[in-house]
Amino acid sequence: MQLTLVDLFDLTHGQSGRGQEGEAVEADSHKQQSASRTANDRTYDLLWAFAAEGGAFLCECDRTSCTERVPMTPSEYVRLRDRDEPIYASGHELA
């Protein structure tokens, strides 16, 4: 069984079951974005701890099936976070 970030979010946040279909899709996209951001924050922490020059961060678009990775340096990541901007793979900004 393969788990998505949405599944992991549900498991770690004690969520189960779904409401109306539209609500489920919107909730899943928010969970996807939140889970991606959390994973990226942890990725940054590891890169910083090991003084790595670069890494790959998850796209934070609202597509629940998105698994794109965005290469960047830790300093580029910090600049995005300082402006509270999400990380998007090319073409995913308006998903």
Image: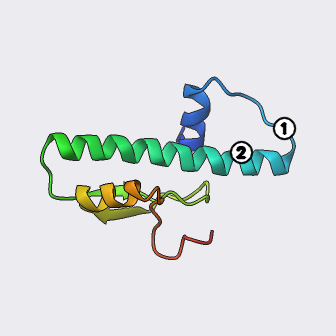
x 30%, y 64%: residue? 71
Instruction: Quadrant for the C terminus, please.
Output: bottom right
Residues at marks 1 and 2, CA–CA distance in whole angstroms: 9 Å
For the residue carrying disc 1, how many other residues have a C-alpha within 10 Å: few (<14), some (14-19), or many (20+)? Answer: few
Q: Please name the residue that numbered disc 2 is placed on.
A: 27
| Quadrant in the rendering for residue 31 | top right
Name the amino acid type tagged 1.
Gly
Residue 45: image location, x then y, percent = 27, 41
Residue 14: image location, x then y, percent = 63, 23
| Placement of 22 over or under 76, stated as above or below | above
Q: Secondary structure at mark 2?
A: helix
x 58%, y 48%: residue? 32
Name the amino acid type tagged 2.
Ala
For the residue carrying disc 2, how many other residues have a C-alpha within 10 Å: few (<14), some (14-19), or many (20+)? Answer: some
Q: Please name the residue that numbered disc 1 is placed on.
A: 19
| Placement of 32 over or under 19, stated as above or below | below
- Of residues 34 and 65, the one nearer the viewer is 34
| Quadrant in the rendering for residue 77 | bottom left
Left or right? Give the position of 46 relative to 83: left
Instruction: Quadrant for the N terminus, please.
Output: top right
The mark that comes first in sequence, 1 or 2, is 1
- Of residues 7 and 30, the one nearer the viewer is 30
Residue 69: image location, x then y, percent = 39, 61
Left or right? Give the position of 44 relative to 38: left
Residue 27: image location, x then y, percent = 71, 45
| Quadrant in the rendering for residue 74 | bottom left
Q: Are marks 1 and 2 in contact (CB under 8 Å)?
A: yes
